[in-house]
Every structure is written in C-alpha cells, then in structure tokens.
C-alpha cells in the first residue's frame, strides 16, 4: 500500500484488505464450479465486502466514513491513498 496513505497511517489497512478480498472472491469464485460458491453466495460476499469497507473505514478523530464520502465524491479517493490527513477534518496522521 502507499506509504503515506491515511488508511495505512491510521492502522486500517487490514479493513481495506478484507473488503477487497471479499469483493474479489465474491466476484470471481462463482466463475469456477469447483470453488463451491454459486452466484447467490458470490453476490452476498461481494456486497458484504463493499459494505465492510464503506461502513468501517473511518477517521479516528471525526468519524467520517472515508469510502462512503468517496463514493459520493470520487475526487476523495486520491487523498485516501496519497495524503496522510483526513479529507474531512484535515487531522494529520503523518506521525504515529
């Protein structure tokens, strides 16, 4: 992950990894019959991964749901991965 990412600096990269894994497994596992995951369960996993990321990756200071805000305004995705400050409250998490 990007070293200056506000997500990494707030210790929430594990939440992003889980969200991405659920999205990927739910999206691609139904393509292979041997996976044991049908389209219904795949859709449930993908939606659960998306909801996990959108609802649980938050600013520790102001409580802003970063990916929810970014879903509403796509220009916020960049600062989540490039900047060390919260896009909402501007709290800098540059030092731990």
Image (cartoon, grey):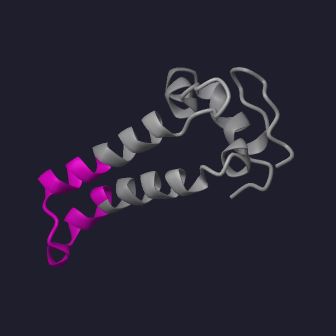
Q: Estimate the x, y position of residue 42 in percent, counting from the top left.
A: 22, 56
Q: Quadrant of residue 25?
A: bottom left
Farthest right residue in view: 95
Q: Residue at x 60, y 49 (%)?
A: 12
Magenta: predominant secondary structure element?
Answer: helix
Q: Residue at x 58, y 25 (%)?
A: 64
Whether residue 31 is in magenta: the answer is yes
Q: Residue at x 16, y 55 (%)?
A: 41
Residue 28 as seen in the image, left or right of residue 6 = left
Observer-nearest of 9 and 82: 9
Quarter of the picture containing the N terminus is bottom right
Q: Estimate the x, y position of residue 11 in percent, counting from the top left.
A: 65, 51
Observer-nearest of 80 and 13: 13
Farthest bottom residue in view: 34
* Above or below, 43 relative to 66: below
Q: Estimate the x, y position of residue 66 in percent, counting from the top left.
A: 58, 31
Q: Which residues are magenta?
A: 26-46
Q: Residue at x 71, y 26 (%)?
A: 87
Whether residue 30 is in magenta: the answer is yes
Q: Estimate the x, y position of residue 9 in percent, counting from the top left.
A: 74, 49
């Amino acid at each position: 992950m990007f070293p200056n990412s506000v997500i990494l600096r707030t210790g929430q990269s594990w939440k992003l990894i889980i969200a991405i894994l659920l999205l990927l497994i739910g999206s691609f596992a139904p393509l292979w019959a041997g996976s044991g995951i049908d389209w219904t369960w795949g859709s449930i996993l993908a939606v659960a991964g998306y909801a996990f990321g959108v609802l649980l990756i938050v600013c520790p200071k102001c409580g802003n749901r970063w990916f929810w805000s970014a879903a509403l305004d796509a220009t916020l995705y960049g600062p989540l991965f490039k900047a060390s400050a919260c896009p909402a409250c501007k709290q800098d998490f540059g030092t731990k």
